[in-house]
């Protein structure tokens, strides 16, 4: 029979990934809702297809087939109660750890509960019939395509994960009658590597390690990463929450945020991704990403994930230190990055009084061995432009990424070591949200808090923010201006002094510089709060200036296009070129 696949892209994607993951045995039950899937696979010689009218029997057949063949076995059924008949067999598969994949067909998920024939709810599974259940609706755009490709990879990997077991895919259909597609789309296959598996080779090419938020590094891990980079000509891309302090550390955020300049360093072949959520929003372009984490989860932050290494970071790097590299190593990549970053940082202009300026003036003054806690978004962005002393550790609440606990996290950390200064930087909304904690009776004298008070959520007003297009109308509700004393010069002063804090304030650069050395002194006598009054226009201007330090020919062309076409015109042109 001639190969011909359904025009439904989610069906094509599932079939292509089944093939890529080597899943070829499929037991099919009759029906209309699964016809796009079944008609597509029956004309592809890769698959071994078996028929069973009774879905209950089909699921048990899959158990026997999976146990005997030591291979995953898929099931396909129509909508309505057909899938309910899989339950006994999937229960068997769950407790026997058999890799059975139940592909249930469904109409549009929005039809559930609308009294439409043959539509039942499969959004929630019993705990002991599957290890994972995913919903795969129709694909509308590239965002859907990326999300469902990752989701399907994750589901198919779970069949063999942690001792194996059954998995459920609920595949939506529109009953397309178009079976004219001759070739399946290219799909990105994600594989999981566990301890004892063969490690993929690191071939010739440029290698970088990207470190998201990371707990304190052991000396052993830091030395392994340094040795790895020296052998494989690698670099370690960090923000202030990465906490890697080896000799291959690069703080790339200023260079990578240039609007009209794209550094050649930003493209490389392999990106090794460790750590958790980063708030740096670093714009880099890897060909492949290798995610290393003991949790073994599929996490595709850069949309280029190829391998997930379910192992400790030390075990990953130890493995590659034992493997002979296939390339000549001159440590040239780190030199390229340093030259690019140094050139851009040397061109930083005099910016207005703002979070950016405060970061520039303060971060190098932090005492060795101190700890820095940064508020999310505007503060984290501003301080990530500038390097801190080598022994300073950094943290931010990037896990949940909310403003509600920045100060509390700082206070909690400061209680661990009363002899070490703990610095925090937060905006006014974050401070007032969390201000009760500085009245806690356990607050120590080692706390130093900078409050950037511009009387609103400046993040929503900066020049490239979504809210900026509304001008002054942004202030009322989007940026929540005017609360908490509306930049009162006395409110925080009296509150903190009554709580035993030493209070400083500044509304100009000169006032700030008069107090910053006292504020950053390593001598610990009493907790300190430095309230700095800025305005949103200066905050926006400072950020825009730092984003426009460097330009090249391509950047100038982009700037001209933006001037002529506007932001929407540039986006429309990009979409046209992508087609």
Image (tube, rainbow, N blue to C red):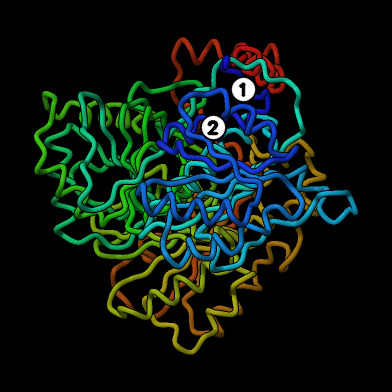
Residue farthest to the bottom?
441
Q: Which of 420/14 is in front?
A: 14
Counting from the top left corner in percent of width and height, residue 401 is at 55, 58
Which residue does the numbered mark 1 point to in the structure image? 5
Which quadrant is the N terminus positioned in?
A: top right
- Residue at 23% from the left image edge and 47% from the top image edge: 197
User: Which type of secondary structure does the marked residue at label 2 adopt?
Assistant: helix
Q: Is residue 5 visible?
A: yes
- Residue at 52% from the left image edge and 86% from the top image edge: 440
Q: Is residue 489 above or below residue 286?
A: below
Counting from the top left corner in percent of width and height, residue 263 is at 38, 23
Q: Which of 400/336 is in front?
A: 400
Which residue does the numbered mark 2 point to in the structure image? 15
User: Which type of secondary structure does the marked residue at label 1 adopt?
Assistant: loop
Q: Quadrant of residue 189?
A: top left
Which quadrant is the C terminus positioned in?
A: top right
Measured in 3D between alpha carbons, the distance from the residue under mark 1 to the one under mark 2, in whole angstroms, is 9 Å
- Residue at 36% from the left image edge and 53% from the top image edge: 275
- Residue at 31% from the left image edge and 60% from the top image edge: 393
Instruction: Decide: few, some or many residues near mark 2? Use Cα within 10 Å; few <14, some 14-19, many ≥20.
Output: many
Which mark sits nearer the N-terminus, 1 or 2? Answer: 1
* Residues tagged 1 and 2 counted as in contact (Cβ below 8 A): yes
Q: Which mark is residue 314?
A: none
Counting from the top left corner in percent of width and height, residue 82 is at 70, 52
């Amino acid at each position: 029979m001639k190969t011909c696949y359904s025009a439904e892209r989610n069906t094509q994607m599932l079939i292509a990934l089944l093939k890529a993951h080597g899943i070829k045995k499929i037991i099919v039950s009759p029906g209309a809702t699964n016809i796009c899937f079944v008609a597509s696979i029956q004309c592809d010689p890769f698959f071994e297809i078996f028929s069973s009218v009774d879905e209950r029997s089909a699921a048990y057949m899959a158990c026997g087939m999976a146990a005997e063949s030591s291979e995953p076995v898929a099931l396909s059924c129509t909508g309505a109660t057909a899938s309910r008949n899989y339950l006994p067999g999937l229960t068997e598969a769950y407790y026997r750890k058999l890799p059975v994949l139940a592909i249930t067909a469904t109409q549009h998920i929005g039809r559930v509960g609308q009294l439409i024939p043959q539509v039942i709810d499969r959004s929630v599974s019993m705990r002991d019939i599957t290890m994972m259940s995913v919903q795969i609706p129709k694909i509308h755009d590239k965002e859907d395509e990326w999300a469902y490709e990752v989701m399907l990879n994750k589901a198919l990997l779970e069949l063999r994960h942690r001792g194996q077991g059954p998995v459920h895919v609920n595949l939506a259909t529109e009953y397309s009658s178009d079976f004219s597609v001759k070739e399946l789309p290219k799909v990105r296959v994600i594989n999981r590597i566990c301890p004892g598996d063969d490690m993929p080779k690191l071939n010739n090419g440029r290698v970088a390690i990207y470190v998201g938020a990371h707990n304190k590094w052991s000396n052993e891990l830091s030395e392994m990463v340094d040795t790895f980079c020296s052998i494989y000509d690698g670099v370690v891309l960090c923000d202030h929450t990465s906490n890697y302090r080896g000799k291959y550390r690069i703080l790339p955020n200023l260079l990578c945020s240039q609007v009209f300049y794209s550094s050649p360093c930003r493209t490389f072949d392999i990106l090794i991704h460790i750590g958790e959520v980063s708030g740096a929003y670093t714009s880099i372009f890897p060909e492949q990403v290798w995610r290393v984490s003991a949790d073994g989860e599929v996490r595709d932050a850069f949309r280029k994930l190829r391998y997930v290494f379910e192992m400790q970071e030390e075990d990953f790097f130890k493995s590659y230190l034992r493997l002979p590299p296939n390339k000549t190593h001159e440590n040239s990549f780190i030199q390229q990055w340093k030259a690019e970053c140094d050139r851009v940082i040397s061109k930083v202009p005099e910016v207005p009084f703002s979070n950016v300026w405060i970061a520039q003036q303060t971060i190098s003054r932090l005492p060795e061995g101190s700890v820095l806690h940064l508020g999310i978004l505007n503060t984290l962005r501003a301080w990530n432009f500038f390097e801190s002393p080598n022994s300073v550790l950094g943290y931010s609440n990037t896990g949940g990424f909310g403003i509600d606990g920045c100060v509390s996290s700082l206070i909690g950390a400061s209680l661990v070591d009363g002899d070490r200064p703990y610095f925090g930087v937060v905006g006014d909304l974050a401070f007032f949200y969390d201000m009760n904690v500085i009245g806690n009776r356990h607050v120590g004298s080692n706390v130093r808090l900078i409050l950037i008070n511009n009387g609103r959520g400046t993040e929503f007003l900066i020049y490239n923010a979504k809210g900026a297009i509304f001008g002054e109308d942004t202030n009322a509700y989007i940026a929540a201006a005017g609360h908490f004393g509306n930049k009162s010069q006395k409110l925080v002063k009296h509150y903190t002094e009554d709580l035993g804090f030493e209070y400083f304030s500044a509304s100009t650069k000169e006032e700030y510089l008069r107090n910053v050395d006292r504020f950053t002194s390593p001598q610990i006598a009493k907790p300190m709060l430095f309230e700095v009054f800025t305005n949103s226009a200066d905050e926006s201007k400072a950020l825009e200036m730092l984003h426009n330090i460097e330009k090249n020919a391509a950047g100038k062309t982009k700037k001209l296009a933006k001037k002529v076409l506007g932001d929407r015109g540039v986006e429309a042109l990009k979409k046209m070129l992508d087609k």
